[in-house]
Image (tube, helix red, strand yellow):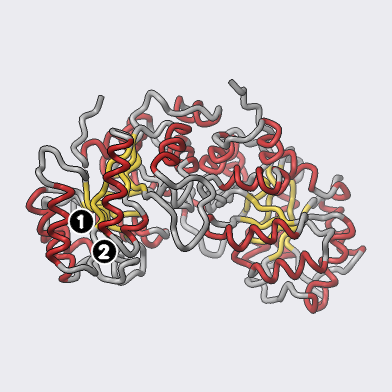
Amino acid sequence: METLVVPWFDANCLLGPQAAAPAEAWLDLDATIEALAAVGIDRALVTSAVARDYDPLAGNERLAGELAGRAGLVPCFVVLPPDTGEFPRGDALLAYLAAAGARAVRIYPRLHNFGIGARWTAGLFGPLAEAGIPVLIDATQADWPEVDDVLSRHPALTLIICRPGYRLIRWAWPLLAAHCGLVLETSLWQACGGIEAVVERFGPERLVFGTGLPEAAPGGAVSMITYAQIAPEARAAIAGGTLERLLWDGGRP
Amino acid sequence: MNRWWDLVSRGQPLADELVIDAHAHMGPWQAFAIPADPSAAGMVRRMDLVGVRCCIAAPHYGIGPDMVAANRIAEDAARSFPGRILPYCCVSPNVPAEAIIAELGRMLLPRDRPIAVGIKIHPSMHAYPAVGERYRPMWEFAQEHAIPVLAHTWAGDPHCRPSAFLDVARRYPSVPIILGHSGGSWAGVDEALEAALARDTLVLDITASLLKQGLLERMVRTVGSERILFGTDLPFIDCRAQIGYVASARINDEEKRRIFGLNAAWVFGMAVA
């Protein structure tokens, strides 16, 4: 019988006050760490809810301050295209991320009102792809044809779709086949047999474990992986190995 | 954390616990691909992985275009997997009343050896309100025989928002009404909780994909653990997430035991071995 020694690394954890959330989703840093630890998770890629719901720069700064000295919690900075001058461009963007130890970025194009087509994001995705910085985006923040377009223009880009739901298989399959940089985060990937199907068809490196905390409770995300009928190496890759490999090493302090 | 979570974290089935999935389906569905085998045999294999002892199933055919086809599929499944798959009698309001009554009689009578253990309605898919006249023969039959009814509910859906069932519960007090998905969203859950506080024949169902942080704990805190049923939507959704969700919830062991199976056994009149 397999002994599950799983290197959990949560790719999708949000921290901080949110504009609209039930009381149960108001977890401070200690409560977040406790909720993850209760189900055996001690590492997480963390995004600021303030950056999402108020201001990316202010939220990122607040997040970096909160995570400083917290082993196992890695900042994921929310970014904007550089055209309006709100965010640094090119090397300056990389320096901004590196200075705070951010090892991935996240975008909210619908919420923050920009397109992910070339007109808006060429100056953003180009440097990120070249530097090997993964980009996270919620499934609700872009259409699949837009995702197809981005990955066609930036084949070196790693784009992690967060919280893709079980209904999205017919959209996702052709794009997983076409773009090796497309990765699905698993917290809402509850298609019946969906974990095994991706592993068999596209390989375990196309899935990264995430909890969706604090919107979602982490226990269900964990059990989808512990019960998956896949090889131990595939389980370890999904649980944390692939995310660790994908994260930008230039962000290390 | 607890013995349930200990098993879940090691990928072991909850073999020694009574786990009843009170909200399952069966077969393919038009809106999306189901990678695993969605047949009864495939469902039982999935149930075995996590330790679900039995499920109560309404085949997708029955929340779609053909309640009779669904009920025959469920009947065959129950015959092939005795004690593992128990049928709901699917009812569509879009067939004549005589057909509804005939189907209810076939699936649920005589009461000492019925084929089905409850009734399933999906007012949203069938685009007809749960309180509408065409459902009346079903509600009257359920009332006469005290048969549980699982109704799909969702916040904001004029056909089946949770509060719509307050009036039904008042008119048919012998019918345990399971509020499928408990209204879905947080707003829906709050509406379902308010309804359940007002009528003690309304039962909550945790079936959903979103696995909201703290939701189960709020349910238990508000109405107690005795009227909350475990459900997964299998094979519409994989059953493996919901197992971990309940096993890791911050409620006590007795509350988990009730939610995982004892409550369903009571609602559906099953003997607990």
Same chain letter for marks 2 and 1: yes
Q: Residue furthest right?
A: A91
Residue at image point 80% right, 51% down: A103
Q: Amino acid at mark 1?
A: Ala
The quadrant of the rendering that contains the C terminus of chain B is: top left
Residue topped by disc 2: B163
Which one is nearer the viewer's eye here, A20 or A213?
Answer: A213
Q: Quadrant of residue A241?
A: top right
Residue at image point 92% right, 63% down: A91
Q: Is residue B175 left or right of residue B189?
A: left
Q: Secondary structure at mark 2?
A: loop
Q: Is residue A205 left or right of residue B85?
A: right
- Residue B239, percent from left and from top: 45, 43
Residue topped by disc 1: B198
Which one is nearer the viewer's eye here, A248 or A4?
Answer: A4
Residue at image point 64% right, 56% down: A162
Report in which chain the residue with disc 1 lies.
Answer: B
Q: Is residue B29 left or right of residue A99?
A: left
